[in-house]
Image (cartoon, helix red, strand yellow):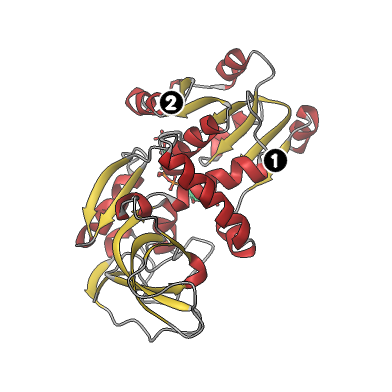
Amino acid sequence: MKAMLCKENGPIESLVLEDFELPPLGEGEVRVRVRSAGVNFPDILITQGIYQFKPAHPFSPGSECAGDVLSVGPGVTNFKAGDRVIAMTGHGAFAEEVNTLASNCVHLPDDISYELGSAFVLTYGTSIYALLQMGKLQKDEWLLVHGAAGGVGLSAVEIGKAMGAKVIGTASSDEKLKIVTEHGADEVINYSDGPFKDKVKEVCGSAGADVIYDPVGGDVFDQSLRCINWDGRLLVIGFASGRIPEAPANLALLKNCFIVGVFWGAWNKRNPEGHAKNMDILFQWLREGKLRPNISHRFPLAEVPAALQVLVDRKVVGKAVITID
Ligand SMILES: NC(=O)c1ccc[n+]([C@@H]2O[C@H](COP(=O)([O-])OP(=O)(O)OC[C@H]3O[C@@H](n4cnc5c(N)ncnc54)[C@H](OP(=O)(O)O)[C@@H]3O)[C@@H](O)[C@H]2O)c1
């Protein structure tokens, strides 16, 4: 089978499409025939060798996919060959086939396509966990979502609305903000026009937003601490801007706010039942039309580097996917 391989860490152009033989299935593993794989920011970081996890070389990036179970390893009872699944592989999904733990998989309902399944779990799973369990977002609270046209950002806008919050989305262009509005944001702010903190306070009519969802970091995080409401929750999701910010503790004190770290990938391994419950809620909202994943780019397996490049170039709105025939 063919896989897009990282043979040593480096730029995304160093990935190569080659024949690759998977090892035999271990205890608790399943082999999945990949039909569609979602493209995510961590796929870039893992290729460059700067992500939390550093797999042994050669490996294929690709942190999530949807496909069919080909075979199951010893001890697997909840999946069988032929089942449609979504797999959160961590890496390995930019390939025709991938081995992964059965515990990383959920059944893909028949009425949801492989493409949607592959573009759904990582972003929406992160955002529901962040907003429900960690942010404790309440109906009618103001939610400020940064990078709102990105993968996790657009999912947070939709989930915030599904939870009954009022949502402000930020992004770097008016074209992106138009789509953020189409996906439910009540207000939008172009943060490339300059500082946004006063605009946020104006919109909220108070000291600021009750919950702030920040996958961007850097200056965006710094300003967020200055427009968060009393008792607010600032959710640390990621650092797409490239700078990990440092929080001045006096501001946290003065604002009486919480700075909350969110590590969804590790949480769902520690709490598979909580993750399964979140997935049930998400599938229900998807069927009700409250969630509408946006796929702006599609690429074949041979063009994974180009797919990662559109993410680097900030061109993706929602998600890019790799389609494997
Ligand atoms: N904590 C968790 O459990 C968790 C889970 C998944 C992802 N993440 C993290 O969340 C972040 C976003 O991931 P994603 O997959 O949603 O990525 P994405 O689709 O590329 O979205 C990131 C957004 O950040 C904005 N951005 C600002 N400065 C940027 C820069 N220098 N380069 C690229 N984008 C920039 C872009 O919007 P504008 O152009 O509008 O500014 C872009 O839409 C990453 O850091 C990722 O590691 C964390």
Q: Amino acid at mark 2?
A: Ser
Specify the quarter for ligand 1: top left
Q: Looking at the picture, tell me which residue is in the foreground, 274 or 57.
A: 274
Residue at horizontal 25%, vertical 53%? 306
Q: Provide the residue designation for mark 2.
A: 192
Image-based side of 307 in relation to 226, left or right: left
Distance between mark 1 and mark 2 Cα atoms: 24 Å
Q: Is residue 223 above or below residue 89?
A: above
Image-based side of 263 in relation to 170, left or right: right
Circle 1 SS class: strand
Mark 1 against mark 2, which lies toward the viewer? 1
Q: Amino acid at mark 1?
A: Ile
Image-based side of 268 in relation to 259, left or right: left
Q: Earlier in the sequence, mark 1 or mark 2?
A: 2
Q: Quadrant of residue 248?
A: top right
Give how far across and how far down residue 122 sits, in percent. 46, 52
Q: Quadrant of the N terminus?
A: bottom left
Give how far across and how far down residue 126 sits, in percent. 53, 48
Q: Quadrant of residue 208?
A: top right
Circle 2 SS class: helix
Q: Is mark 2 within 8 Å of ligand 1?
A: yes
Q: Is residue 3 above or below residue 318?
A: below
Residue at horizontal 29%, vertical 68%? 95
The crowding category of the residue bearing disc 2, from other C-alpha atoms within 10 Å (few below 14, some 14 to 19, many at least 20), is: few
- Residue 259 - label: 1
Q: Is residue 184 above or below residue 124?
A: above
